[in-house]
Amino acid sequence: QVQLVESGGGLVQAGGSLRLSCTASGSIFGDNAMAWYRQALGKQREWVAVITSGFDTNYADSVKGRFTISRDNARNTVYLQMNSLKPEDTAVYYCKLGTRYWGQGTQVTVSS
């Protein structure tokens, strides 16, 4: 059974930075794309960023230029570096492994 554990969320002022981590159990990490999603209160979950097994990356327009996704296959970990945070980035952030596995989420709150 694959498990994903996120960490690194918290409360930060607008303009600040946070780095989220998501560590996966199991041996399938390196073969799969990893993605970050977020869900704000009362809104649908939305895709934020993805990194493929070949380290190609792509970002939602709302975070492009501010967020950076990376992965460390030796640590089975994917990261989301978030800079220049805005209040509208406030959400629960989830990581996703492949098409099937989700983490439990970590709260990010950006105060104005």
Image (cartoon, rainbow, N blue to C red):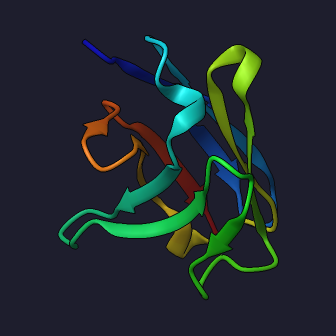
User: Residue 92 vs residue 35: left or right?
Assistant: left
Instruction: Name the residue at 80% across, 68% down.
Output: 84
Residue 10 is drawn in which quadrant? top right
Q: Quadrant of the N terminus?
A: top left
Q: Where is residue 58 in the image (x, y as percent from the top left)?
A: 65, 73
* 83 lies above or below 92: below
- Rendered view: 96 above or below 68: above
Relative depth, front residue between 83 and 110: 83
Looking at the picture, tell me which residue is in the foreground, 33 or 112. Answer: 33
Q: How many marks?
A: 0
Vertical comparison of 12 with 106: above or below: below
Residue extending furthest toward the bottom: 61
Residue at the image point whose x is 52% and y is 46% from the top: 34
Residue 9 location (% of width, % of height): 57, 36
**Measured from the top left, where is residue 16 in percent x and y?**
81, 56
**Nearest the eye: 84 or 5:** 5
Tell me which residue sits at (75%, 16%) in the image.
74
Q: In which quarter of the image is the C terminus?
A: bottom right
Q: In this view, does 24 lie to the left or right of 110?
A: left
Indicate the position of residue 8 as horizontal and vertical percent values. Answer: 62, 30
